Image: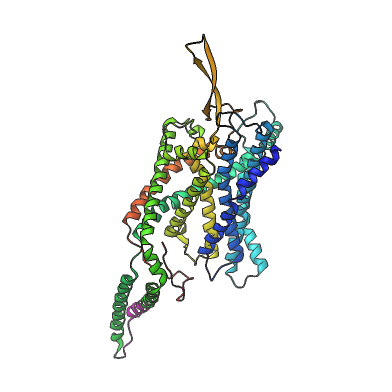
């Protein structure tokens, strides 16, 4: 009976947000994909990979809720939460992580690279389908090798060394396999996912930290006036036409133009064509109902921008206090800056455990944090673009993002969402480890009307000093802190995140208003005269 009750609980908790996640991913991907170059496989891949990342992040509050649900607020286990049921809960969540993380590894190291290279080969018209598949598989093989190496390193580098120092080589190899089998591959999978999370941390430092300042400030500043931009553009057209007439006047008597004048004339004519394209788009925007509608929403956008700034400051202050707490009171770098309890309180660390007692308020808050990360990351990617060192590979535009860029976009967002689990742990370590669990401790009470002392059990919030049989650690924590050096890298990454946010905030404040048009570049092959581009910031 208890098993059926628990199964119904897990299904109820997990299935409710799935439809919302899939709907959001479909709308999100369809919003940015190119209408002229859309591909079914790349669209499905992008939607699926982003949905898997969000579902994995949604497992965090479910994990915390289930370990908290097993205990009463007075610190005692509920009647149905015996040892077997507790183990079943832990194993179910752990297998859920195994499944989702395995799918993430499959997407990152095989499917997304394969689809990307397949469409790269498709650009060549002379290439057949079989050749495209073969070439894509050849390039994808390198990613598969990297994944295999990560799994092997994580699996065969045990955290516990054999006790017998005089053991033979065969005994050492046997110990490695026993260690792998006893942990059910937890170390191998944890090492691989932690490696991806480390890459996600770098993406969050580059894109999310800047987007947290760029998004609200762009909402507050808005865009330039279309009529004013059109007036400036008309003046530029007149100036370019005057230059063209001046150059052409040199050849009225039939003399050929010098090579330098011919080059200048060609450049001015190309510039004139670009300005006339811009004129047509500005005229369309100025007279469109969407521009008038966005103008009416300006007060609401300003309010949202101010709200996002307060959210960013709340997040940054909480992260700073959490990192400062680790710097002052943690066990050191060798432990991954693990901290026992919370010595410096931060706003989110106080708010999450409080909301956790009323399900699903903490779930809602974590969802808001994750969605905030996605939107700010998207703002950072839109402003910065996708680069390979100093070479810009792709731009992300509403309705004009190529299939390859869409795959890159979802890959980056997938890695950033993976990193949010550790960010939430950084802000509320006790909440992520134990939820709202309490355990009983003996307290000696002295009564004046009785002789001697009386022992009384009182509840205490679970922390790192709690007995293992009294508090159940979340499966999320096992993945986050399996390897201390990853935790240490995340700690220093948080400081870099704060530094980039401050620099990005200064840069965003100094930048002026954006144009109502997206910038027209010569390397934009997806631009056409029939596609006016609007900023709907």
Secondary structure mainly formed by the magenta segment: helix
Taking the spot 53% from the left edge, 69% from the top edge, the residue there is 35
Q: Is residue 302 above or below residue 228?
A: above
Taking the spot 59% from the left edge, 55% from the top edge, the residue there is 19
Q: What is the x, y in percent for residue 470?
A: 59, 28
- Relative to residue 243, is residue 13 drawn left or right? right
Q: Which residues are magenta?
A: 253-269
Q: What is the x, y in percent for residue 224?
A: 33, 65
Closer to us: 161 or 95 = 95
Task: Check residue 489 for magenta coloring.
Answer: no
Q: Residue furthest top?
A: 451
The image's colour scheme reads: rainbow
Q: Residue furthest front?
A: 449
Image quarter hosting the N terminus = top right
Asked where in the image residue 469 lies, by quadrant, the reply is top right
Task: Check residue 256 for magenta coloring.
Answer: yes
Asked where in the image residue 346 lies, by quadrant, the reply is top left
Taking the spot 40% from the left edge, 40% from the top edge, the residue there is 320
- Relative to residue 352, is residue 244 drawn left or right? left
Closer to us: 251 or 337 = 337
Taking the spot 48% from the left edge, 49% from the top edge, the residue there is 368
Q: What is the x, y in percent for residue 453?
A: 52, 12
Q: Is residue 215 above or below residue 158?
A: below
Image quarter hosting the C terminus = bottom left
Q: Is residue 101 visible to the viewer in this orientation of the structure? A: no
Closer to us: 289 or 378 = 289
Q: What is the x, y in percent for residue 98?
A: 64, 44
């Amino acid at each position: 009976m208890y098993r059926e009750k628990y199964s119904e609980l897990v299904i109820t908790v997990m299935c409710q947000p799935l439809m919302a996640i899939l709907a959001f991913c479909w709308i999100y991907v369809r919003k940015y994909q190119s209408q002229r170059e859309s591909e079914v496989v790349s669209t499905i891949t992008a939607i699926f990979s982003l949905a898997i990342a969000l579902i994995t992040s949604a497992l965090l509050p479910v994990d915390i809720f289930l370990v908290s649900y097993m205990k009463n607020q007075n610190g005692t286990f509920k009647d149905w939460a015996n040892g077997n049921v507790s183990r079943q809960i832990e194993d179910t969540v752990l297998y859920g992580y195994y499944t989702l993380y395995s799918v993430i590894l499959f997407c990152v190291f095989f499917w997304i690279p394969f689809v990307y290279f397949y469409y790269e080969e498709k650009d060549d018209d002379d290439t057949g389908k079989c050749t495209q598949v073969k070439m894509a598989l050849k390039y994808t093989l390198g990613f598969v090798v990297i994944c295999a190496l990560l799994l092997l390193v994580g699996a065969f580098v045990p955290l516990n060394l054999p006790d017998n120092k005089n053991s033979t080589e065969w005994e050492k190899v046997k110990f490695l396999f026993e260690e792998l089998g006893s942990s059910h591959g937890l170390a191998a999978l944890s090492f691989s996912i932690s490696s991806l999370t480390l890459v996600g941390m770098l993406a969050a430092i580059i894109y999310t930290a800047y987007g947290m300042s760029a998004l609200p400030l762009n909402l507050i500043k808005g865009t330039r006036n279309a009529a004013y931009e059109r007036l400036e553009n008309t003046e530029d057209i007149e100036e370019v036409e005057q230059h063209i007439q001046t150059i052409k006047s040199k050849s009225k008597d039939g003399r050929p133009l010098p090579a330098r004048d011919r080059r200048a004339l060609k450049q001015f004519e190309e510039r004139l064509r670009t300005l006339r394209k811009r004129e047509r788009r500005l005229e369309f925007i100025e007279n469109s109902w969407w521009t008038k509608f966005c103008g009416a929403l300006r007060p609401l956008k300003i309010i949202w921008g101010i709200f996002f700034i307060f959210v960013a400051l709340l997040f940054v202050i909480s992260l700073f206090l959490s990192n400062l707490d680790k710097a002052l009171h943690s066990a050191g770098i060798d432990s991954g800056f693990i901290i026992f309890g919370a010595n410096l309180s931060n706003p989110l660390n106080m708010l999450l455990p409080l909301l956790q007692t009323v399900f699903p308020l903490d779930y809602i808050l974590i969802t808001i944090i994750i969605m905030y990360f996605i939107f700010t990351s998207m703002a950072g990617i839109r402003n910065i673009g996708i680069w390979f060192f100093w070479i810009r590979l792709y731009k992300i535009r509403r309705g004009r993002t190529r299939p390859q860029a869409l795959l890159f976009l979802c890959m980056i967002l997938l890695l950033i969402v993976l990193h949010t689990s550790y960010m939430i742990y950084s802000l509320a370590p006790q909440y992520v480890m134990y939820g709202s669990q309490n355990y009983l401790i003996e307290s000696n009470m002295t009564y004046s009307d009785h002789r001697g002392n009386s022992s009384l059990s009182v509840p205490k919030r679970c922390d790192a000093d709690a007995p293992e049989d009294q508090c159940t650690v979340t499966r999320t924590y096992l993945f986050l802190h399996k390897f201390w050096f990853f935790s240490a890298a995340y700690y220093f990454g948080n400081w870099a995140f704060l530094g980039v946010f401050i620099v990005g905030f200064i840069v965003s404040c100094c930048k002026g208003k954006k144009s109502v048009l997206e910038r027209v570049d010569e390397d934009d092959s997806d631009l056409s005269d029939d596609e006016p581009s609007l900023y709907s910031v």
